[in-house]
Image (spheres, rainbow, N blue to C red):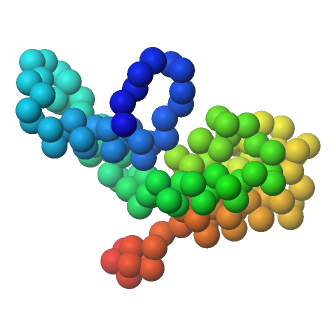
Amino acid sequence: MEVVKECSAYLSNYEVLDILQNIKANKKQKIKQNQLATITYQTIRYLEETPCKRQTPEKIRNFLKAMEPFKLTKCEKLTLLNVCPKTPLEIQLIVEDSEDRLNDEEVESLLQVIANYLGEDEQDEKDG
């Protein structure tokens, strides 16, 4: 994956992690700047401790398809993908005017979709 035009699209944490891991793995690209290597390393370490570590392109596609009925903005969907909220309060903080746009059942349904598509895998639960 390559960023062709800066600021023309939003990237999920998963996409950033994937890009940085590819940069790190491809040592053939002579990175002159030590700062870039440090930033790459630190960002990868941070992102590997976030929910994006368990995400895959297939999980993300399925999640976004399941989000269609909720009529959320792209930024709201991206934030839900990156944060993987587990409580109604977190949904309220992410979705603008959520109390007007979503009723209690929709919030619970939204949390269930997040848990189903982005929740921890069985193996992760056993390890954790």
Residue found at x 33% / y 44%: 18
Image quarter in which the N terminus is found: top left
Q: Where is residue 113 drawn, in percent x and y?
A: 68, 64
Residue that appears at 8% across and 32% down: 28
Of residue 41 and residue 28, the one placed in the foreground of this image is 28
Q: Which of the 4 image quadrants contains residue 39?
A: top left
Q: How many marks?
A: 0
Q: Is residue 54 left or right of residue 89?
A: left
Q: Residue at x 73, y 37 (%)?
A: 73
Q: Quadrant of residue 22?
A: top left
Task: Note whether 62 is above or below 46 in the view shown.
Answer: below
Residue 126: x, y in percent? 38, 82
| In-front residue for pair 60/52 | 60
Left or right: where 57 falls relative to 80: left
State the image coordinates of residue 110 (x, y, percent, origin top left): 73, 59
Relative vertical location of residue 31 with respect to residue 118 in this rendering, above or below? above
Note whether 37 is above or below 61 in the view shown: above
Residue 87 visible, this orientation: no
For residue 43, say whether it is visible: yes
Question: Which quadrant: the C terminus?
Answer: bottom left
